[in-house]
Image (cartoon, rainbow, N blue to C red):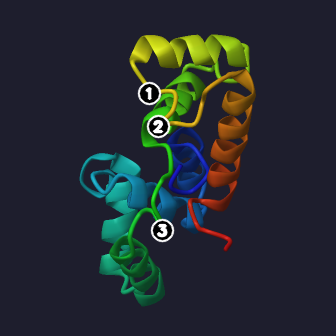
Amino acid sequence: MVNGEKMTSLVPKAIAGDEDAFRKAVKIDRSLLSYHPYFVDRFQSAQANGEAEFLRRLSHNNSTPGLIGKISYPGLYVVFAMLESLGWLDEISHSEILDICDKAGLDRWQNRIEDVNYVTKRLAGYRRYQRTGGVSMH
């Protein structure tokens, strides 16, 4: 949710040479620079070759917070993210999502999911949040 894009798409894009995807992936997981062979090699190459602009952008990207603003419904968004990572978020009904939230112990009032219509509204908000990378448009 940090960038509105999954790591499973950022890493292959970075390996294909997309520097923006490289920076986004490292912002999500800095350990890539220490453990992923491509990321380690690319970072070391940039340092050895004096790629100042690449290193400056990478440094700036990592010095800013991952999220700008507060997530309104963190528990609910975790449920949505888990369902999405399993490939189920778009496959199950909103009624089933509400049942999962109940079984997970999420407070309906606190997460503003009193009924199925509210689940639909919260899911739309989650999708907007993904598209904007968590940046408030207000």
Density class for disc 1 (Cα within 10 Å; few <14, some 14-19, many ≥20) is some
Q: Earlier in the sequence, mark 3 or mark 1?
A: 3
Question: Which amino acid lies under the numbered mark 3 shown in the image of this protein?
Answer: Ile
What whole-number distance in Å separates the C-alpha atoms at marks 3 and 1?
25 Å
In this rendering, position of residue 24 left or right of residue 121: left
Which residue is at 51% across, 32% downward?
109
Q: Are marks 3 and 2 in contact (CB under 8 Å)?
A: no
Q: Are marks 1 and 2 in contact (CB under 8 Å)?
A: yes
Q: Quadrant of residue 67?
A: bottom left
Residue 19, disc: none
Position of residue 22 relative to residue 96, above or below, is below
Residue 107, disc: 1
Position of residue 61 relative to residue 16, above or below, is below
Question: Which amino acid lies under the numbered mark 1 shown in the image of this protein?
Answer: Asp
Looking at this view, is 36 or 88 the one in front? 88
Residue 110, disc: 2
Instruction: Give the mark toward the camera: 3 or 2.
Output: 2
- Location of residue 38 in the rendering, given as x and y in whole percent from the top left corner: 40, 52
Density class for disc 2 (Cα within 10 Å; few <14, some 14-19, many ≥20) is few
Q: Quadrant of residue 14?
A: bottom right
What whole-number distance in Å separates the C-alpha atoms at marks 3 and 2?
22 Å
Question: Which amino acid lies under the numbered mark 2 shown in the image of this protein?
Answer: Gln
Which residue is at 72% across, 38% downward?
121
